[in-house]
Image (tube, rainbow, N blue to C red):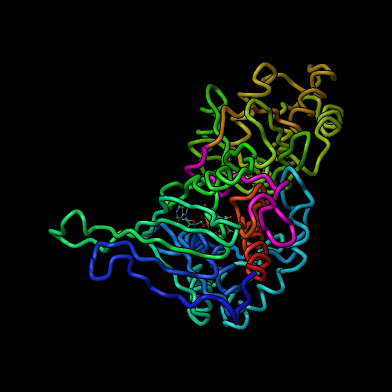
Amino acid sequence: HISPNTSPKIDTVQNHAGSTNAPSTLAYDVIIIGAGASGLFCALTAGKRGRRVLVIDHANKAGKKILMSGGGRCNFTNYDIEPKHYLSSNPHFCKSALSRYLNWDFIGMVSQYQIPYHEREHGQLFCDTSANDILQMLLTECRANQVTIQLKTTIQQIQALPDNTGFVLTVNQQANQQANQPANQKSSEQTLTCHSLVVATGGLSIPTMGATGFGYQVAQQFGHTIVPTSAGLVPFTFTDKIGDAIKSLSGVSFEVIAFNERISFRLPVLFTHRGLSGPAMLQLSNYWQVGEPIFINLFPSLDMAAFLAEQKKQHPKQLIRTVLNDHIGAATLPKKVMSTLQNLLWQDMAETELANIKDEKLAQLGEQLNAWRLTPSGTEGYRTAEVTRGGVATDKVSSKTMQSQLQPNLYFIGEVLDVTGWLGGYNFQWAWASGFVAGEVV
Ligand code: FDA
């Protein structure tokens, strides 16, 4: 590594002196591709060490996802960060970085900046005022440490220098648009060199916010493999009768246990006009594969088979909906849900008194109410997903530094890697932690 003392000056070298259209060469210690959560955090960390850092982004604004996160309030971390809150082909990969940059470290920084924040359920920490507070904190730290952020810049080519001493990037920076500008002045080509190159381009979610698969291409260029990607933390969609029934309950939300054979979450479900959403569904989506069923325990606090058997003894003349409504329904499930469930699950016995329903049938219904089986037709996809599952395989990346084991001085941080967090501030904590450990060594 080039130590801060011996690092090259940032020189602008005009390749063809006097020619304004000629590409220029700029030399940095570190170039980070992606001015998102992990890229900015890596930049300010490296900047503090005296490294000359350039952050490039093709978007017209840094940190767009930070701004839209947590409904505009940015759920920036969680009081309870543990490796079990992350999915990856290698579940151990996240451990080292998470243990070296803690949630408390980030909370300390937020407190130092006097950003007001509050805790919500399950240890989630949100800004009181705006996600912009977090973005401004990161940008202020970047400025204070002489980090250069260059927006509206696309990368044409990345080449490793001979002897692995660094990289040369050919980029195009779009000029600020002015009326009647000749086409050849709308962008300018630059050649950039750096010792360390950090890929922080995030995942594929929300393409309208600038998400691209560019990081995966760079990884493949240097021999890395990509764990197949899919939308994570995303609502489920349904077709047919179930789809219509769910649509009819649009806006209804209540607590359930959503589960499959891998995991369960006791959280609210939200019915929408497109399908099932809410924290329970978003969390479960991280553990779901196309074609698989999901299960919803509609009465998480009751063994419904036992409950219905007991009601049959106590109130033999009553109907199923009456005992559900009278004895538990009003307290747990909105009325609208009860009639929809009746249409779907016990239409054939809707008008039959409990005494006349076979024990076996009641028990079956009870089991269904505790484990309502639904098979989503899909998810809403990257258009609304909060994260991307899969990504750059971690097998050839150092878990301590995020450095590629295939190409010296190349790093991958944040969501571009095959590390996916739960809902609740876990993805940002991964962005800070992975950005930090790379920022300490680049
Ligand atoms: P991030 O996406 O932040 O940044 C990547 C950057 O790379 C972008 O600026 C992009 O423009 C740039 N880029 C991409 N391709 C490029 C290219 N070809 N050339 C140049 N630049 C390129 N997490 C959490 O913990 N708490 C929360 O509250 C939320 N809320 C939330 C809401 C919504 C709507 C979404 C979509 C996501 C969240 N998340 C979240 C997830 C969180 O936003 C996400 O995991 C992190 O932003 C990932 O940080 P990265 O730095 O890896 O990517």
The C terminus lies in quadrant: bottom right
Q: Position of residue 81 (x, y in %)?
A: 74, 61
The magenta segment is 380-407
Q: Position of residue 250 (x, y in %)?
A: 51, 39
Q: Is 189 situated above or below 292? A: below
Q: Position of residue 286 (x, y in %)?
A: 66, 42
Please tell me how many numbered marks the rendered image carries.
0
Q: Is 348 situated above or below 121? A: above
Q: Position of residue 153 (x, y in %)?
A: 38, 58
Which residue lies most toward the left here? Answer: 180
Q: Which residue is painted at 81% across and 20% down in the image?
A: 355
Q: Which residue is painted at 47% across and 42% down in the image?
A: 383
User: 261 or 249, which lies in front?
Assistant: 261
Residue 413 visible in the shown view = no
- Name which quarter of the figure residue 121 lies in: bottom right
Q: Which residue is painted at 63% across and 46% down in the image?
A: 392
Q: Relative to residue 15, is residue 158 drawn left or right?
A: right
Confirm whether the magenta stretch covers residue 339: no
Q: Relative to residue 156, is residue 100 drawn left or right?
A: right
Residue 14 visible in the shown view = yes
Q: Relative to residue 231, is residue 273 drawn left or right?
A: left
Confirm whether the magenta stretch covers residue 383: yes
